[in-house]
Image (cartoon, helix red, strand yellow):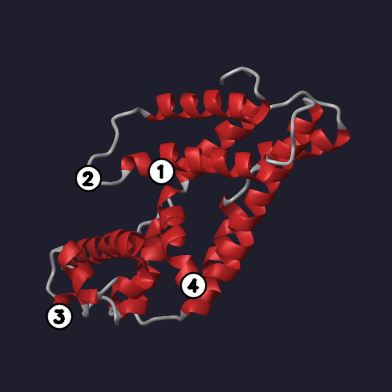
Amino acid sequence: MRRKQQAKLAAIAAAALTVFSRDGFASAQVADIAREAQLSVGTLYLYADGKQALFELAVEAAFPGADVAAERDLRALPKRPCGMDATADLIEQASRERARWPVLRAALRAAVAGDAEPEVAGVVGEMFDLMSRERPIIRLLDRCAWELPELHQVYGAGLRARYFRDVEQYVRSRRAAAHRAAEDSAAIGRAVIEMVAWMAMHRLAGKEPTSVETATARRACVALACGGMLGASAAVR
């Protein structure tokens, strides 16, 4: 009995993650999630008490390595909603542990000090690895955070905005060091981020996902970014 409950809860969490990532919070319906999980709506409500509770299961399932069914006390089902503030707190706490970009931060410090050569390959490789590793939660928040003020404060105006600023500052400093125009640094940085996001995350989604292997996609991102940021080649690694 316990294994069946775990299997159903895991299926519901995975279905909720799929539906919310695809449709957003406002448009997603409990019936859509039940259909995705191949369960009746009545059965679904035995495991999660409404749309907010389902969204919280989706957030939990989005973190790499999470096992929602194994980690939850099945005697406490159905899951009751904790609220969006608590969900935002969970995401903020997890981001402190998982959302780090030490190569970019080190490159920024070196650029300010003027004592290091451009390290575009390392910065873009780190970007690809971060997006690839955290793909489920990034896709979920990219789709839903703009509809939910609590999550937008933590993610859209917080974590995501900080990363974008760091990338722009890095591009600006390196282009200036190479005596290239720096006024378009924000556009170049955003273009690089969007390119990497597609190759690391979105190429695997959709009805016809591309067959490009991960290592090949990573090398392509590094090669293109090296030329786009600095207009010069850099070691691909």
Instruction: Between label 4 and label 1, give the one nearer the viewer.
Output: 1
Q: Earlier in the sequence, mark 2 or mark 4?
A: 4
> Which numbered mark, 2 or 1, is in the foreground of this view?
2
Label count reads 4
Could you tell me the amino acid type at mark 2?
Lys
Q: Nearer the viewer, mark 2 or mark 3?
A: 2
Helix, strand or loop for disc 1: loop
Q: What separation in Å lies between label 1 and label 3 (alpha carbons)?
A: 34 Å
Q: Is residue 19 visible?
A: yes
- Choose the circle earlier in sequence order: 2 or 3: 3
Nearer the observer: mark 1 or 3; the answer is: 1
Q: Earlier in the sequence, mark 2 or mark 1?
A: 1
- Gap between marks 4 and 1 measured at Cα: 23 Å
Secondary element type, mark 4: helix
Q: CA distance from mark 2 to mark 4?
A: 30 Å
Q: Where is residue 181 drawn, in percent x and y?
A: 74, 33
Location of mark 4 (residue): 87
Callout 3–callout 4 Cβ contact below 8 Å: no
Residue 204 or residue 78, whichever sits in front? 204
Residue at image coords 77%, 36%: 173
Determine the secondary structure under disc 3: helix
Q: Amino acid at mark 3?
A: Gly
Q: Which residue is mark 2?
A: 207
Label 2 – label 3 distance at C-alpha = 29 Å
Question: Which residue lies under the disc numbered 1?
Answer: 201
Pick the quarter of the image with the C terminus.
top right
Q: Amino acid at mark 4?
A: Thr
Q: Secondary structure at mark 2?
A: loop
Q: Residues within 10 Å of mark 1 (few under 14, many from 20)?
A: many
User: Where does label 3 land, which residue?
Assistant: 42
